[in-house]
Amino acid sequence: MSAPLAATATATAPQLSLSEVMREMIARHPDALIVSTCGFTSRELFNAADRPGNFYLVGSMGMSAPVALGLALARPERTVIALDGDGSLLMNLSVLPLVAASGTQLLHVVVDNGMHESTGGQSTVQRSDFVALALAAGYRAAVRVETSDELRAAELPTGPTLLHALTGPRADGPGRRVTHTPQQIVERVRAAAGHPAS
């Protein structure tokens, strides 16, 4: 029986955090449209880098990749990032072949802390091999990172690509809740995507 993926991390290297992964993705793709999964992930993105191109899915678990796919299909010239969690993706694994077949510039970032942290820290199934799942579904590329150095060095080509980032539990609180209404979030993202306001 193989060891859990978490056990393969270097014992002396500090674990990645959601905020570190998020900052790296924004630095690489400052103009990307970002769809963040519900709970603490959206709250952390809101507090760290509230921007018009952020689509906060405040209460829609399992839907960050499908919504990001819709944006990527509507705006094929744009980089779209689905900021997902392990629990969220496990809830909707059927999206993987759809993303793979899309031919879009979607970057699917799965931040995996092995738990449903937003609802009390209940464990997910275990550290799943999302890289193998994405490649089997037909993603152009999939990469797993466990340290800051690996994150910075990760090559993420254009196309349906998955980044599986193994992270530790949150060190502090997630910050304020998203203060924009769902209607405001939609209008901001529409404008950022270059679509006329409704």
Image: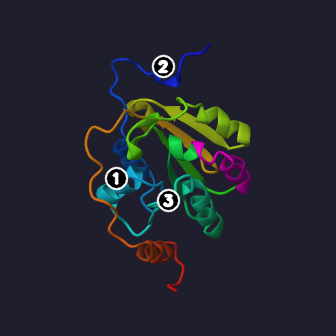
What secondary structure is found at the residue carrying circle 2?
helix
Give the Cα separation between the discs numbered 1 and 3: 13 Å
Question: Are discs 1 and 2 less than 8 Å apart at CB?
Answer: no
Residue named by callout 1: 44
At which x and y percent is residue 169? 35, 35
At which x and y percent is residue 44? 34, 52
At which x and y percent is residue 8? 48, 19
Residue 132 lies left or right of residue 117; in this view the side is right
Numbered mark located on residue 8 in the image? 2
Disc 3 residue type?
A: Val
**Residue 134 in sight here:** yes
Q: Which residue is drawn at the image coordinates 68% and 37% (left, top)?
A: 135
First in sequence, mark 3 or 2: give its number: 2
Q: Nearer the viewer, residue 140 or 70?
A: 70
First in sequence, mark 1 or 2: give its number: 2
Magenta stretch: includes residue 98: yes
Give the Cα separation between the discs numbered 1 and 2: 27 Å
What secondary structure is found at the residue carrying circle 3?
strand
Disc 1 residue type?
A: Glu
Give the Cα separation between the discs numbered 3 and 2: 29 Å
Q: Which residue is drawn at the image coordinates 41% and 34% (left, top)?
A: 167
Label 3 neighbour load within 10 Å: few <14, some 14-19, many 20+: many
At which x and y percent is residue 74? 63, 69
What number of labels is visible? Answer: 3
Residue named by callout 3: 35
Numbered mark located on residue 196 in the image? none
Label 1 neighbour load within 10 Å: few <14, some 14-19, many 20+: many
The residue segment tinted magenta is 90-102
